[in-house]
Amino acid sequence: LVLCNTMMSNYVHQGLAREALAVFDEMLQQGLQPDRVTLLSAISACSHLGDSLSGRCCHGYALRNGLEGFDNISNAMIDMYMRFGKQEMAGKIFDCLPKKTVVSRNSMIAGFVRNGDVESAWRMFKEMPESDLVSWNTMIGALVEESKFEEAIELFRDMQSKGMKADKVTMVEVASACGYLGALDLAKWIHAYIEKNEIPCDMRLGTTLVDMFARCGDPQSAMRVFNNMPRRDVSAWTAAIGATAMEGNGERAMELFDEMVSQGVKPDGVVFVALLTAFSHGGSVEQGQKLFKSMKEVHGISPEIVHYGCMVDLLSRAGMLKEASDLIKSMPMEPN
RNA sequence: UUUUCUUGGGGACGC
């Protein structure tokens, strides 16, 4: 049982919800009785898959086996129904909770935000008896998602003044907001803040900082952060490529791409958008066409409509309207 | 029972 639970928990945390549910099925087939730890992972897996049928089965199982009284099970179900867009159901479970914890409220708040009901999220946030780091991060993230970047920074300062310590999630949100604002002074302050407070800089935060400096018009700082990253996935490389592309340096962008490939990092569709955009802005038609061809032939990635869009943009900017409209006609999908 | 449940990163064009 513990082995299965451990496997399921790991799968869910790796984003492999399907595999987690496969273990769950296997358990049921072998007659192994799931306990509440199992169920937590199962519920979480259903939530992330959007599998409401299995999710309701889990709910039923919890009711039949008297597991609904555990607040973490109820919290997981609140999260689940919120992800399914079933706010009323989540609210019902929340209202019936005898012991509402900070996690219950955080789950409700995150759910409201996800469903676009930011007002309800605010209300609960303001009225909650004790908020924690996740509560603050959720609300800051909500503001960023709404493109209310100044307000997000303001809430971050508010958080500081309340003595709440920021973590790497907070900093990703704040750095992202700063990037959209294009505020270089703030960017430098954020970078210094992270170092001063020894906030662990993982790959995601590193990537966000690269992106932030690039958007703030400081590609040198962006590349300095990038070069100091101990590990880089395709998103990190894409941010760096975007930084050089902002200088209109398609050649440098391509060098970075080749370096990435030579290090064994597999390109995805997004990095090609960044590169094609760089060529488009630099007017490098041949290089763009060559790269576009290589997508499928070399990297085994079928161009999607956004890539055709980039090519149409590239050709059109160069005045090659005939080629652009031919490309549209030859696309394997309907133009949008 | 990695960490029982809740929060974070790279995307073209136009406006």
Image: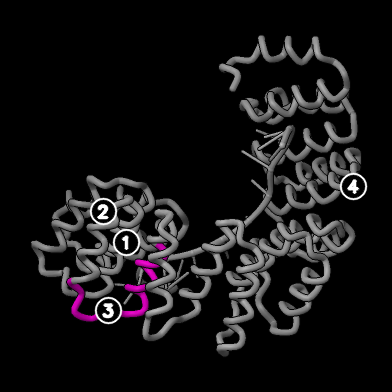
Look at the numbered discs 4 and 2 and tell me whether their residues touch, using CB distance below 8 Å. Answer: no
Secondary structure of the residue carrying numbered label 1: helix
Q: Label 3, on which residue?
A: A100
Secondary structure of the residue carrying numbered label 3: loop
Of labels 4 and 2, earlier in sequence is: 2
Of labels 3 and 4, earlier in sequence is: 3
Front disc: 1 or 3: 3
User: Is disc 2 on the same chain as disc 1?
Assistant: yes
Disc 1 crowd rating (10 Å Cα; few below 14, some 14-19, many 20+) is many
Q: What amino acid is labelled 2 in the image? A: Phe
**Residue A42 seen:** no
Q: What amino acid is labelled 1 in the image? A: Ser
Of labels 1 and 3, earlier in sequence is: 1
Q: In the rendered structure, find residue A248 and report the number of the disc placed on it.
A: none
| Residue at image point 59% right, 72% down | A170
Disc 3 crowd rating (10 Å Cα; few below 14, some 14-19, many 20+) is some
Of labels 2 and 3, earlier in sequence is: 2
Look at the numbered discs 1 and 2 and tell me whether their residues touch, using CB distance below 8 Å. Answer: yes
Mark 2 and mark 3: Cα distance apart in space: 28 Å
From the viewer's perspective, is A218 left or right of A84? right
Mark 1 and mark 4: Cα distance apart in space: 46 Å
User: Is disc 4 on the same chain as disc 3?
Assistant: yes
Q: Label 1, on which residue?
A: A41
Q: In which quarter of the image is the C terminus of chain A?
A: top right
Q: In the rendered structure, find residue A247 and report the number of the disc placed on it.
A: 4
Q: Label 2, on which residue?
A: A24
Q: What amino acid is labelled 3 in the image? A: Lys
User: Is disc 3 on the same chain as disc 1?
Assistant: yes
